[in-house]
Image (spheres, rainbow, N blue to C red):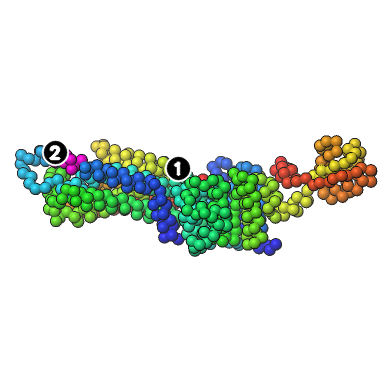
Amino acid sequence: MLLKNTYNEFIKILAKPRSYLGIGALTLLVLLILFAMKADGKSFISFVTASFEQTLSFNGNILNGNLIAFIILQMLIVHIPLLVSLVTGDLISGEAAMGTIRMMATKPISRTQIVLSKFIAGAVYTFILTLWLGFLALIVGKWMFGSGDLIVLNSDGLVILKEQDILWRYGLSFGVAYLALLTISTLSICLSAFAENSIGPIVSTMSIIILFTIIGTLDVSVFDSIKPFLFTTHMASWRSFFEDPVPWTTIRNSVSILVIHNIVLVLIAVYKFNKKDITS
Amino acid sequence: MENTEIIKVQHLAKNFGSFQAVKDVSFTVNKGDVFGFLGPNGAGKSTTIRCMLSLIKPDNGQIQLFGKDLNKHRNEILSKVGSIIEKPDFYRYLSAEKNLAIFARISGKDVSKREIAEMLDFVGLNGRNRDKVGGFSHGMKQRLGIAQTLLHQPDLIVLDEPTTGLDPQGIVEIRNLILRLKSEQNKTVILSSHQLSEIELISNRMVIINKGQSIIEGDVKELLNAQEMVVQLEVNDMEKTINVLKIRFESASFKQINERIIEVNIEKQLVPSLNQTLVQEGVEVHAMEPKRKLEDFFMKIIQS
């Protein structure tokens, strides 16, 4: 029954116009960045490298597909949560608002299975969105700008990664970025279990992200103890794969925090939905 | 009528915060019944039905369907139940057949595309299979709701206010459909309504609930027959008729409609005697017609 209802959830997601809104918006944003970089990328790069030009000499194709993908990821990872929650935040509460949750809940499928099927469908949608981002950023980026070594400016300084040493880093960084987005998806579905309208969970998800991000950036000692446990602290962990050497312990810690968030949020949603009186 | 109990609800209670939606509701539905679930708006009908379908968790009481406890055998029980609660809601962005396929897939029974098409045909939605439900009228959605209810061939059908918002033709169609389900397929139907005429026309048994409590339960005809009835008399001599009523039938009450017509509220067993007495006293009784009295009965019950 879980698989059957997961299939149902895919049909619903595929039929909803808002599902394509996210993919469309993502495509448009990436294409805009690609176009901007094609038109004026060199001055953008020289602005970044200007401070190093007295000590370093940059040769070859610096503005290549690998750098473009990095820039796109950095720019969009903040905005994609909105596109994810736009679809996933609606999965339970949207049905409550429409009244179809009442029809579903009178069928011989457990409420736990209803919630889990929505989580699976949300996870797959998020995966497709991440994959699409990867395709646009890396494949289209390389097609338009060619390949080459990747120069990344970290807080420690400039990191230069060889062309043949990059692909695996992108593979793993997209994996971690997916996990971060999955946490957003799970959070919005969890909030969706508490709401009876579509907008509430979407707005709440974004509010939580903004609040946690502000807490994370505030240099106030009172928040120091909670910062490491906020999922927003680990949203940019994908960047760690572009450090040399790769800080595996930090990445493992981030992955653990994100996985724990996902598990806890799923459990809360299942508990809440099982206890809920469906009066809509 | 077989007397196998399909539903047994005992002392059901449900609070929403400080509001007591259902205080103490008990009733039994037998196999093959078209069971009327009657009560004014806000009586607790929908809450009771939602409890029976596990949408709402009761605070107290027991619900058994098909002889099994709903809490322990929820999925097994719900696979034998088809329902419409208040109004059927569908995915507006999907077609009628895709909506049915979605609900069929989680109904506990494999339903083929052919069966879906046949069901749409059965409820009069043939030719609209691929149209998006968003463009359907209320009546069409109601028919689609009936199709969704019947698709997995349930033994028990629960219809909560199924004719709300329908035009007169739609009401008659739904009514006929329910009667067909009983006569042709021997389905057990629970019909919740605040429309007394609907219950009177379709149901063989009923329960009346008011303010969250079941007031009376039984065979519709027996319940009505046991009470006083209203007969409308057309007579040639109104003065003499009123005298007879006052002197010989003190327990009866009456209301003169015009010079020839009078409505008499009288015990059913006294009706033949009333007719006989009037004739003996020289009154010509041109017509004696029982009036529909479920409304009066209902009002009397809930007022008491």
Residue drawn at x 18%, y 40% as measured from the top left: A39
Q: Mark 1 points at which residue?
A: A197
Depth order, front residue of B48/B275: B275
Q: Which chain carries label 1?
A: A
Task: Give the mark nearer the N terminus: 2 vs 1.
Answer: 2
Say which mark, if any, is on residue B148.
none
Percent position of residue B229, x then y: 79, 46
Badges 2 and 1, same chain: yes
Residue A43, label in figure? 2
- The quarter of the picture where the N terminus of chain B appears is bottom right
Residue in view at x 5 percent, y 44 percent: A57
Name the image quarter holding the C terminus of chain B.
top right
Q: What span is colored magenta in the figure?
A: A36-43
Whole-percent x, y for residue B256 in the image? 83, 37
Question: Given the image, on which type of amino acid does mark 2 rest?
Answer: Ser
A213 to the left or right of B60: left
Q: Is mark 2 on a helix, strand or loop?
A: helix
B53 vs A182, left or right, is right
Dot 1 amino acid type: Asn
